[in-house]
Image: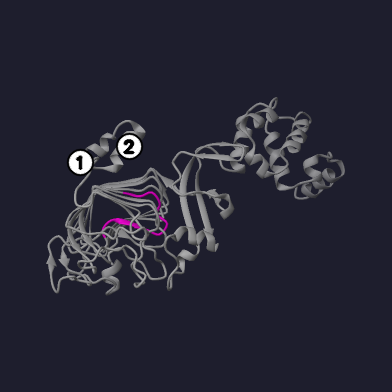
Amino acid sequence: MENIAPALLEWFYKNQRILPFRTDPSPYHVWLSEIMLQQTRVSAALPYYERFLAALPDIPALAACEEEKLHKLWEGLGYYSRVRNLQKAAGIGKGDWVCLSLSNNDPTLVAQELAPHRVEGNMTDIQTITVEDYHQVASVSGNRVTFAEPIMYAVEAKWGWKIRKYPHYEHVGVEDLTFEGRSKENFGHHASWEDDGAYKPLNMMRLTDSWIRRVDFRGVSEALSIVSSANCSAYDIEISGNRGHSGVRSQSSSRIFIGKVCDRSRGQAVSPPYTSTGYFENAGQYHASGVSNTSLGAVLWNNTWGDDAFFESHSRQPRATLVDRCTGGFVQWRFGGDETNVPNHLGDLTIWNLNATRAAHDFGAEPFKWWLSSDKWWKTMPPIIVGFHGAAVTFDESAEQVKYLESNGAAVEPLSLYEAQLRQRLGYVPAWLNSLK
């Protein structure tokens, strides 16, 4: 028996049939023949094989083929799931999750992104425009891909956009838990590793349609980061104990909902103090809940943070953030980010009905500015501000500082822009959201 293999191979080489996928054994040809020859005789499959390759000579052509044409080419072979799976393996199909990405250092694009401002000082990160936007595919027809969710950044082919499959987990939930750390009694921003990240209990990474709810964090450095994820929610969360570095963050993620996060952590005022000394029973994490990196489409809804805090916008190109009907301190210097990574936030930052419990900033009686050319850390693209109220703040209304300003000093209707958008799109506000009010 041990000598049978060489004998069989010798017989095969002498007597094998001449078949097109043997004379040209490219991976695509062999793959197609293997699929066609499942439960089909070679003689019956050969005409289909040759016709299929003439119409779809390579994998990109197969991936872009419209469904009707694909089925017509397969007609007569039966078992149509074979060709559907063949196309799905070749490219992107309905139900797939993908990343729509851009990385381009064209000076024209950089200038377009920063207008009316420009690159200043050591702003190196923004000199390559980076977008990472995660989407589920609703349909594919030829070279047209339709997403289930809206696109929140203008896509122009000339800048070299790419689309790739997005490996992920889905339907992951964390709920009804308490995480407890031992954060320092006197927090100092970047004072030590203990201050910045010693107690960081939870990261949610590469997830879709996932959630964290009814969870408490006590004495933590950083409560939660939702990283490289999409369509996830974090809500009904309480942060307490000694204050730490940050709250709940959308980091490099798409369409993250952060709602009803109540930050009651306590501690000393942090430099810049704006008061010489001070202890806040309701200080809040240094950075309240917010966004960082290429976050896109995050919603901060009905959150409450401390009097010595502000929502986080931690540089490295976050965009399209809605801060909606939130309450807490309006304390400058809480956005964050290295001088090489600013602006703190790019376009489409909307602040709607923010109730400021305390205002503390460097401008004194002068109007508040979002972009300071004289400072290497404080640079935010002009936001939309509607219904700002509570502690009084006068904003610089020039085009370089504010994109749109309405009703400064008094809340507006609707109280929540997010809820109004849901009513417009769905016809109602979901029960789970109503239950949080």
Looking at the picture, tell me which residue is in the foreground, 115 or 236. 115
Give the amino acid at mark 1: Lys
How far from the left and from the top, in percent, is residue 257? 32, 47
Compared with 400, 155 (above or below) is: above
Front of the two marks 1 and 2: 2
Label 2, on which residue? 422
Helix, strand or loop for the magenta stretch, by majority: loop
Residue 238 showing in the rendered view: no
Give the amino acid at mark 2: Leu
How far from the left and from the top, in percent, is residue 333? 28, 67
The answer to whether 77 appears left or right of 175 in the picture is right
Residue lying at 38% horizontally and 47% vertically, measured from the top left: 255
User: Nearer the N terminus, badge 1 or badge 2?
Assistant: 2
For label 1, the SS is: loop
For label 2, the SS is: helix
Toward which corner of the image does residue 291 lie, by quadrant?
bottom left
Residue lying at 68% horizontally and 28% vertically, measured from the top left: 72
Give yes or no for residue 389 being in the magenta stretch. no
How far from the left and from the top, in percent, is residue 435? 22, 38
The answer to whether 119 appears left or right of 24 in the picture is left
Image mark for residue 437: 1
Distance from label 1 to label 2 (Cα)?
15 Å
